[in-house]
Amino acid sequence: MARNSHFRLARRETQIMEVVYRLGRVSVADVLAQLPDPPSYSAVRATMNLLEEKGYLKHSQQGARYAYSPTQPRQAVRRSVLRRLLQTFFGGSAEAAIAALLNLSDQRLSESELDRIAGLIEAARNKGE
């Protein structure tokens, strides 16, 4: 898979990958049933083949159908996307990204959410010691 290619998925490709990660092993019909405003079967199949060419998906034969699954765990993809996002929009600064996320929220964070965030900060602080 091309370095940093996770950051460059089209909207429909991203929707398909979300379905694949949620369901695990899928057929084209499985994905089609989960997509909002779904395109044709052949359009989904073509997009999944493209995702396979890009290195996001792999397939195996299951009877007359292909069963697709991701080539990398969701966490690895998440890390890759976040690294690229940090570099592109925040100059590599996690602090700037976190500040933007906190300012973006339309609603106030609950006490339990704030406690979890504080716990993550404390764990990061202890990790550096």
Image (spheres, rainbow, N blue to C red):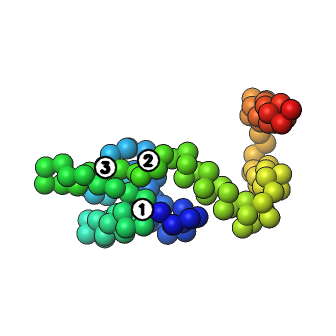
In front: label 1 or label 2: 1
Could you say where residue 74 lies in the image, as x and y percent from the top left? 51, 47
Q: Which residue is mark 2?
A: 21
* Residue farthest front in this picture: 129
Q: Which residue is mark 3?
A: 26
Mark 1 to mark 3 CA distance (whole Å): 16 Å
The mark that comes first in sequence, 3 or 2, is 2
Instruction: Tell me: 31 left or right of 126.
Output: left
Do the numbered discs 3 and 2 sit on residues whose CB atoms are within 8 Å? no
Q: Residue 73, labelled with which disc?
A: none
Residue drawn at x 80%, y 64% is 91
Label 3, secondary structure: give it.
Answer: loop
The mark that comes first in sequence, 1 or 3, is 3
Q: Residue 55, labelled with which disc?
A: 1
Structural crowding at the residue carrying mark 2, measured as other residues with C-alpha within 10 Å and reported as few (<14), some (14–19) or many (≥20): some
Label 1, secondary structure: give it.
Answer: loop
The mark that comes first in sequence, 1 or 2, is 2
The three-letter amino acid code for the residue at tag 1 is Gly
Q: Image quarter for residue 123?
A: top right
Query: Compared to 102, does 89 lie above or below?
Result: below
Q: Image quarter for residue 44?
A: bottom left
Residue drawn at x 38%, y 44% is 23
Pick the front one: 36 or 13: 13
How many numbered marks does the figure carry? 3
**Residue 128 seen anywhere in this rendered image of the structure:** yes
In front: label 1 or label 3: 1
Query: Compared to 118, does 8 lie above or below?
Result: below
Query: Compared to 116, does 34 lie above or below?
Result: below
Structural crowding at the residue carrying mark 3, measured as other residues with C-alpha within 10 Å and reported as few (<14), some (14–19) or many (≥20): some
